[in-house]
Amino acid sequence: MQHTDRVRSRVPDGTLIRGLYSAVYLVEHGKKRPISDLATFHSYGFTAKSMVELNESVLEEMETGSPVNISGDFIMNSPSTLLVKNSGSEIYLWSDRRLHPIISHEMYHRLHFNYSSVVILPDELIAILPQGDMIHDASLLTSFLINGRVYSAPNGSIYYGERHMLRKIGGPAIFAFYRWRVEEIVHLTSEEFHNCRIGEPIL
């Protein structure tokens, strides 16, 4: 049985999916959120190379969530995890409906963030969005695990960060299926891994 036949509602959050037809969705909190249009697709930095194709039967079983749209209420319409900035130089992680200033260049590079994926928002919008904790060199020693990153434990096991928990990836075939990249794995120290909560595996 192929992995696509086993997938159900536990597609990892942050996965861009599509079926045999043109509709594209972003998976968040177990729901498929329709990408409203091409302008939204490109404005949020989505790319076809990161898209995972699922059987139509699998898509139909997944609950549909609110659309992702570049227009309207940013808090409601945006992806739940996103790199953003205003006209200044500071870059933020938008997560859990809060802006988290990334104050550590070392952590920015360690997490394999890429400037090409940063979404520029109006200054007036950045000014009114709720502020969260800063992301600094010791952030991974706290319970604030960055969602949407692939992590390795000290023993070499590979995990995906979702809802501030680590979900163990069930093997190389699953790693390849979800289009994750080896060069973007974040290597955790023993102390960092010990502080992480463990979720259900990705099988």
Image: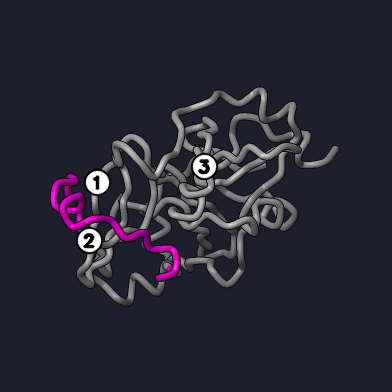
Q: Residues within 10 Å of mark 2 (few under 14, many from 20)?
A: many
Q: Could you tell me how far apart the alpha carbons at marks 3 and 2 are, in whole angstroms?
A: 29 Å
| In the depicted structure, whether residue 45 falls above or below residue 69 | below
Q: Specify start and end residues of the magenta stretch as a single range.
A: 114-134
Q: Residues within 10 Å of mark 1 (few under 14, many from 20)?
A: some
| In the depicted structure, whether residue 33 falls above or below residue 14 | above
Check whether the beta carbons of the residues at disc 1 and disc 3 lie within 8 A of each other: no
Q: Earlier in the sequence, mark 1 or mark 3?
A: 3
Q: Amino acid at mark 1?
A: Arg
| In the depicted structure, whether residue 114 falls above or below residue 151 | below
Mark 2, residue position: 101
Q: Could you tell me how far apart the alpha carbons at marks 2 and 1 are, in whole angstroms?
A: 10 Å
Camera-nearest residue between 136 and 35? 35
Query: Visible in this render: residue 141?
Result: no
Q: Could you tell me how far apart the alpha carbons at marks 1 and 3 are, in whole angstroms?
A: 25 Å
**Disc assigned to residue 53:** none
| In the depicted structure, whether residue 158 falls above or below residue 11 | below
Where residue 159 sits: x, y (%)? 55, 54
Mark 1, residue position: 98
Where residue 151 sits: x, y (%)? 50, 60
SS at mark 1 in the image = strand
Q: Residue at x 53, y 68 (%)?
A: 184
Q: Residue at x 59, y 59 (%)?
A: 157
Q: Residues within 10 Å of mark 3 (few under 14, many from 20)?
A: some
Check residue 130 for magenta coloring.
Answer: yes
Q: Quadrant of residue 192?
A: bottom left
Q: Earlier in the sequence, mark 3 or mark 2?
A: 3
SS at mark 2 in the image = strand
Mark 3, residue position: 37
